[in-house]
Amino acid sequence: MADELSELEARLFEWIRQSDFDSMPWSTANAAKAFKVKKDEIYEAVAALTRKVPERIQVFYKEGSVHIAAE
């Protein structure tokens, strides 16, 4: 997996995996701030993760918010 992911994608994946965004809502703005990048870069990285490691990440909508789970 590590060979396929950019540095940002790998760091973001690990952050998502260690966080609780499956039960608490995801915030692209907070992720962008944490990684010191623009929101568009976070959107692109999350989209890339769903293509590159689809069996390890789930993006879903629940109770009016986006949630993300990774393992």
Image (cartoon, rainbow, N blue to C red):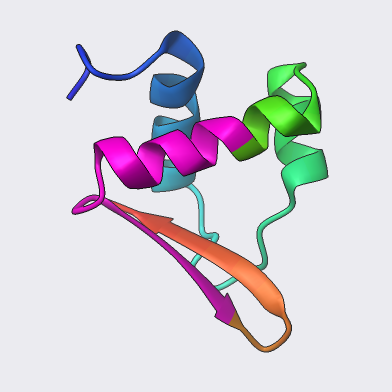
Quadrant (top left/top right/bottom left/bottom right) for the N terminus: top left
Residue 53 falls within the magenta-colored stretch: yes
Judging depth in this view, the residue of 45 and 31 nearest the camera is: 45
The count of marks equals 0
Judge left or right: residue 49 versus residue 3: right
Q: Name the residue at 49% across, 42% down.
A: 47
Spot occupied by residue 64 in the image (x, y as percentages of width and height): 73, 84
The quadrant holding residue 34 is top right
Judging depth in this view, the residue of 52 and 25 nearest the camera is: 52
Judge left or right: residue 55 versus residue 46: left
Spot occupied by residue 15 in the image (x, y as percentages of width and height): 49, 35
Up the image or down, 69 lies above or below 38; here it is below
Q: Name the residue at 51% across, 17% down.
A: 8
Judging depth in this view, the residue of 63 and 46 nearest the camera is: 46
Up the image or down, 46 lies above or below 26; here it is above
Q: Name the residue at 75% across, 18% down.
A: 37
Spot occupied by residue 46 in the image (x, y as percentages of width and height): 51, 41
Q: Name the residue at 51% across, 59% down.
A: 20
Q: Residue furthest bottom?
A: 63
Up the image or down, 11 lies above or below 29; here it is above
Up the image or down, 49 lies above or below 58; here it is above
Residue 47 falls within the magenta-colored stretch: yes
The quadrant holding residue 52 is top left
Judge left or right: residue 58 versus residue 52: right
Spot occupied by residue 65 in the image (x, y as percentages of width and height): 70, 75
Q: Which residues are magenta?
A: 44-61
